[in-house]
Image (cartoon, rainbow, N blue to C red):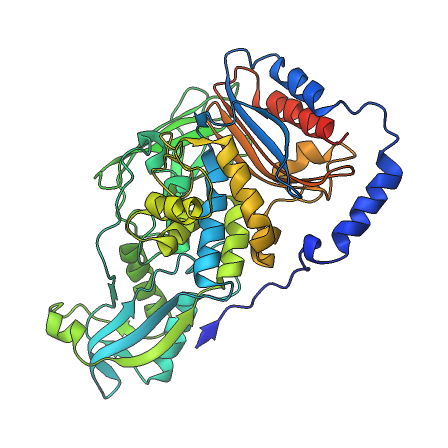
Amino acid sequence: MIRKKRLKRSCVPWKSSMGKRILCAWCITCLPVLLLAQPANALHDFLRSAGLEHASIGISVKRVSDGGVVCEHNPRLSLRPASVLKLLSTFLALEKRGEQFTYRTTLSYAGTIRDGTLHGRLIIAAGGDPALESAYFPATSFLSSIVEAVRQAGIKRLAAPPVVVEPGETPRVPGSWPWEDLSNYYGALYHSFNYRDNTYAVTLAAGKPGSLATILSVDPPGLELALDNRVITDPAGRNDVWIYGGPFASRLLVAGNVTGNPPRYLVKGAMHFPASAFTGELVERLKSGGIRVERDPLPRADSLLEGERHLLLTVESPSLEEIVYQTNKRSVNLFAEALGALVDPVDFEKAVKERLGSAGIDTSGVMMEDACGLSPMNAVPAAFFTDFLLWAFPRSSRAFWESFPEGASDASLAVYAAHPLLGHGLRAKTGSMTRVRALSGYLLSPRDGWLAFTLLVNNYTCSPRQLQEFTRDFLAGLLR
């Protein structure tokens, strides 16, 4: 059995003396700062920021200690939350399955081995693992493990190619995911068998100004992709390339601009048939390892696949703790959809409402089309997220707490960390899509202790950087 190494991280601040030490230090060093506004003034200034005149804004800030409101604005208004929605799938998956839960994928064979030849099939049985050959977990190679297991079994020749057996139905495509998202890497669908984050890469080279760029390569090779290249070389523009098309389209459009700086540009697409891509690459790896793979007319009969199997290898995924860490730190949509399926494989929204509704949290304004936040039809009130965070605070595992991006160390919060008060005391999940910015998490106040907060902004007209700066100043103003 192969098991990937678990990460070791520090303890949860609120369950140790660390939080108290930070709080005491802040009380000594930060209280004399005279420029901190009262929460009401901070809210007033934020709402009057240039570029928010036409925006829909929901804000909810409460003290963790007693649930008291620090400040709020349209707290019950349902707004698009983007990736802040991942807080729900990560917490509830941990609650349901535990930190050490792992997915299992098995390699077995059906048939017989005679004189080094497998007369039958190599069978890879999918177990829902979203992290096989994942860029987020590079320590273990699934492909290399299979080749070695086949060698150890004494197999030198396969009479037919390997096959992946996937339980369940073809993954549902959320009907509200935009066409321009579905074929880019962040729109990769979650399957029962997933491979390379269900992502492929197209490498482009710029040509003469005004000419088409050249597609140099597609990785992994061997994908059955028909790409209609419309990428223009524009040295005066910017590198901005996207892939368009649905998951079952026979031809995909690659469009946009490249500048020639860098000379080669990489764009990542969603791999909609990961099992097919995997078996193709596995065959090549087996051949390069000295194992012949024939294409004899051996049917994929149910009797062969459902009959006796001989186990060769079991691969365990990283622990749920590690997957949750990457999901929130790196905002991985594929992982969030996998976790949502752990919570409920049929109706994630219903499961969330039932669980949190039973805890006394008002779910009446919650509308969810997915578990990752990609759908523009998701709509959730700021107060719902804040109340969820209040409820989750004493129930959270170390894994959930440490999955929050931290002001002092994570790039997604770099703008906020530029303020002297928003370092180790800020842990929050960001969310972004076109004209949407969201932030939800915990903020350590020298006066009030931990605050739970949510800020949702839809349809702003300033730049995203400006909105982040306005948000930074608002959060600093709460630390009176």
Depth check: 264 or 398 in front? 398
So how many labels did they put on this image?
Answer: 0
Location of residue 450 (image quadrant): top right
Q: Is residue 161 above or below residue 339?
A: below
Depth check: 192 or 273 in front? 192
State left or right for residue 22 relative to residue 114. right
Instruction: Identify the residue at horizontal 42%, vertical 48% (top origin).
Output: 358
Location of residue 412 (image quadrant): top right
Locate residue 280, reporting x and y percent: 29, 59
Q: Quadrant of the C terminus?
A: top right
Locate residue 18, reporting x and y percent: 76, 54
Locate residue 155, reporting x and y percent: 30, 81
**Extreme-bottom residue of the structure:** 115
Depth check: 422 or 141 in front? 422
State left or right for residue 111 relative to residue 152. left
Instruction: Identify the residue at horizontal 47%, vertical 19% (top origin).
Output: 459
Instruction: Identify the residue at horizontal 65%, vertical 16% (top origin).
Output: 44
Locate residue 274, reporting x and y percent: 31, 53
Q: Is residue 458 above or below residue 290?
A: above
Q: Is residue 298 visible?
A: no
